[in-house]
């Protein structure tokens, strides 16, 4: 039976593919089924809204239950769901934090002497104990960095506030909850 795992996650296709491979490996090892592809829904501005992983499961209640357990173990964002025409269940425990780094309104020197990769690496290091996966989006006016964590958005935001306040490229950034 075919199911769709709709991930409330802003994942680049290659990041989604990593999760798809992990799920496929689990399903294969357990003899429960396999993944059969995936997709990404983009906003008209080109930012990822969410992504899907298509899954074919053996037609047993046990296969669905084992997959749901694995998804909770692996960690996926809140607001995700596993569904088909006869079944729908919300899944996910991770919260998502997005940092939108302003790419147009800061002094030229800031862009010349700062690096968005430093922001990404520094935040990843600060959140390393609770970080499950990451992704990003390069837009025309900003760069979005996405972090999915095993703690609340507010706790993660609090953990990174000193870095955000001290790094020049983070001036005028927006930090929002995405899951």
Image (spheres, helix red, strand yellow):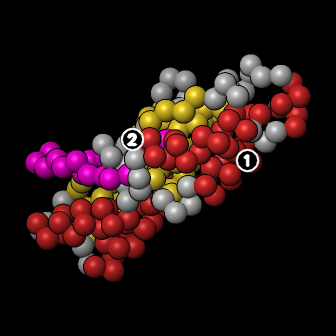
Q: Is residue 175 left or right of residue 107?
A: left
Residue highlighted by disc 1: 117
**Residue 179 numbered mark, or none:** 2
Residue 75: x %, y % from top left: 37, 59
Question: Which residue: 51% across, 57% down?
Answer: 131
- Where in the figure is residue 102, as x and y percent of width and height? 68, 27
Which residue is pictured at 10% across the width and 48% down the height? 86
Q: In this rendering, is residue 38 above or below 97?
A: below
Pointers 2 and 1 in contact (CB under 8 A)?
no
Q: Which mark is residue 158?
A: none
Label 1 crowding class (10 Å Cα cut-off): few <14, some 14-19, many 20+? few
Q: Tell me the chief SS of the magenta region.
A: strand
Residue 168's spot in the image, x, y percent?
A: 77, 34
Q: Is residue 119 above or below residue 25?
A: above
Asked if residue 116 lies left or right of residue 36, the reply is: right
In the rendered image, the residue lying farthest to the top is 105
Q: Secondary structure at mark 2?
A: loop
Q: Quadrant of the C terminus?
A: top left
Mark 2 crowdedness (10 Å alpha carbons): few <14, some 14-19, many ≥20: many
Give the vertical position of 42 relative to 107 (above or below). Answer: below
Q: Nearer the viewer, residue 17 or 94?
A: 94
Region in magenta: 80-97
């Amino acid at each position: 039976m075919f199911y769709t795992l709709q991930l409330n996650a802003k994942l680049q296709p290659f990041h989604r593919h990593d999760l798809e491979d992990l799920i496929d490996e689990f399903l294969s090892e357990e003899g429960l089924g396999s993944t059969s592809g995936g997709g990404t829904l983009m906003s008209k501005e080109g930012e990822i809204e969410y992504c899907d992983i298509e899954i074919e499961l053996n037609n047993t209640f046990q296969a669905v239950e084992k997959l749901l357990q694995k998804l909770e173990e692996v960690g996926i964002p809140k607001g995700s769901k596993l569904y088909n025409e006869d079944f729908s269940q919300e899944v996910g425990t991770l919260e998502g934090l997005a940092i939108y780094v302003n790419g147009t309104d800061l002094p030229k020197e800031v862009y010349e002497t700062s690096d968005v990769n430093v922001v990404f690496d520094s935040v990843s290091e600060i959140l390393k104990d609770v970080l499950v996966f990451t992704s990003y989006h390069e837009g025309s006016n900003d760069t979005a960095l996405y972090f999915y964590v095993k703690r609340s958005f507010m706790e993660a935001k609090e953990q990174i506030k000193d870095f955000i306040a001290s790094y020049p490229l983070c001036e005028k950034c927006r930090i929002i909850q995405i899951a």
